Each structure stands twice: as C-alpha cells, then as structure tokens.
Amino acid sequence: MRYFLYLINETAKSKLTIIIKAYDAVMKGIQEEALASVDRAYGGIVRAGKGVLVENIATQLIDIAWNDILDQLSSRLTMNKTKINIGIKNEYISKIPNETVKKYVGDHLADHIYKFGTDVHVFIDDKLVLPIECKAYTENAMLKRILFDASLMKEATGINNYFLLQLESQLGGDYSTLNEIIYGSKPSHAILSHVDINLEIITLLKGERKVMAPIHKTEFYKELTLFQLERALLKFTSALEKYKKR
C-alpha cells in the first residue's frame, strides 16, 4: 500500500487535510455541545456527532477517489441513503404452521416488505456499486448485524462487496493497530466465516476503543492522521477503479 501512495496528488492531499480539520473541530466540540444541551441526552448527542462525522468522511473519501484520483466525471457519481425493498422468500410461506396466517401472507405478498439500507450508498451511472457502513466504533455483536444487512444487500442487489468504515475498533485482535497487514480477531473471523460476504474493515484511529476513555474528551483524544486517511482513500479508489472510463 505504501508504494501506491504516490497516486495521491496534491489536490487530494489538500482535501484530506480539510477532513482532518473537520474531525478535530467535531471531536473538540462534541463535549462542549453535549454538556450545554438541555433537550437531548448527553450520550445521544455524542453518538449523533460521531456517527454523522464518519458518514461525512466516507462521502468525502469517495468523492476524492472518484474525482481526484480516478479523474472521472462528477455527474456519474451519486451518493444517498435510499432504502432498498426486500420481500418474503417463497419457501418461508410454506413453513408457516398456521394455515390461516399462511394464506393471509401468501395473499398479500406485495405488502410484506422490509426497507433497509446502509449509511452510504455509492452509485455509478445510477447503479449501486458500493455500500458503506459507518460507525464511531464496532464490536462483534454489531458486526453480526452489519453482516446480516450485507447479506440482505447481496440478496436484493447482487452486491457481494461491503465496506465498514469505523473511527475506532472494539473487535479485538489487531484491527486497531493500523498495520499494513491486519490479521483480524478470532471472534470476528468466526462470525465472518458464516456469511458469503467480502467485508472490508477500515479503521481510522489507532488503539482499541475503551468504554471509559471516550475520544471526544480532551484527555482521551486520538489523532486522525493523513497517512491513515490516504490508506482508506486508496482502498475506496481500488473498489471504484473498475467503473473508470478511459
């Protein structure tokens, strides 16, 4: 990955620097905003602030990858959170034990819809190509839910590649070391082995997440580095490169 960092031009680096400045502003402002609020729970403000921040980082990285690294037309790229409909499998109906319920469900298939989606949907030429889940942190119980959503996404759209962008990791193992090669964690590998999904986990901040050391507090603040943003950018660039027009 270090070898390919030369692909990142000065325009891209300048935009990455702005992301870092935005991260610093949000992290240093969350605590003050949460303490000053009388309308919302402290934890809610903190979670919302971090969650929106990661989504914004994801969309900025995709935009930089597409426009500044791959040099593609902006008009071909769109991002949104549009929900996707998924219906009932036919084999499910046959397993319903109550005949009255079975008939009711069978007669109203079009009404039995679950709407789902992830935090950032990346479209190229109006085709969904990359779902990105954005988290302030992830632990393995959350990973299970993410993988279930990824499985639904694959069933509904055929997309097998899924990204998880997180500020911190609480998955165990070495996800938070930010090393060139990540071996993962034993529980995470066990969970991942049960789904047919290619999940790319990108961690932005070094050091395992600690419940009693929230990074929005000054004494536990963690630096977002240019190098780690560059590595994340190149991962997204690699995922989008197949849609590049010469």
Image (tube, rainbow, N blue to C red):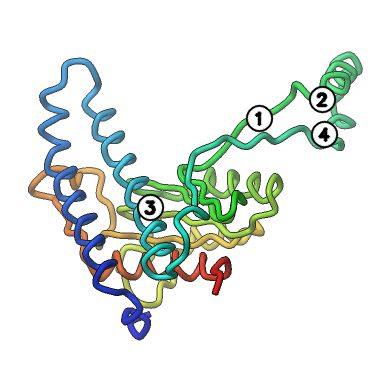
Label 3 and label 1: CA atoms lie apart by: 26 Å
- Residue 23 vs 8, above or below: the answer is above
Would you name the residue on which mark 2 appears?
A: 109
User: Quadrant of the rendered structure where residue 47 is?
Assistant: top left
Is 189 on the left-hand or right-hand side of 47? right
* Front-most of residues 150 and 95: 150
The residue at the point 60 percent across, 49 percent down is: 126
The residue at the point 39 percent across, 49 percent down is: 138
Label 2 and label 4: CA atoms lie apart by: 11 Å
Inspect the image, locate mark 4, and give the three-letter code of the amino acid beneath it: Tyr
The residue at the point 10 percent across, 33 percent down is: 32
Q: Secondary structure at mark 3?
A: helix
Inspect the image, locate mark 3, and give the three-letter code of the amino acid beneath it: Ala
Please identify the quadrant where the C terminus is shown. Answer: bottom right
Would you name the residue on which mark 3 appears?
A: 58
Inspect the image, locate mark 1, and give the three-letter code of the amino acid beneath it: Tyr
Label 3 and label 4: CA atoms lie apart by: 36 Å
Disc with the residue nearer the chain's start (1 vs 2): 2
The circle on residue 146 is: none
Bin the neighbour count of mark 2 within 10 Å (Cα to Cα): few under 14, some 14-19, many 20 and up.
some
The circle on residue 114 is: 1
Q: Nearer the viewer, mark 3 or mark 1?
A: 3
Is 22 on the left-hand or right-hand side of 63? left
Label 1 and label 2: CA atoms lie apart by: 12 Å
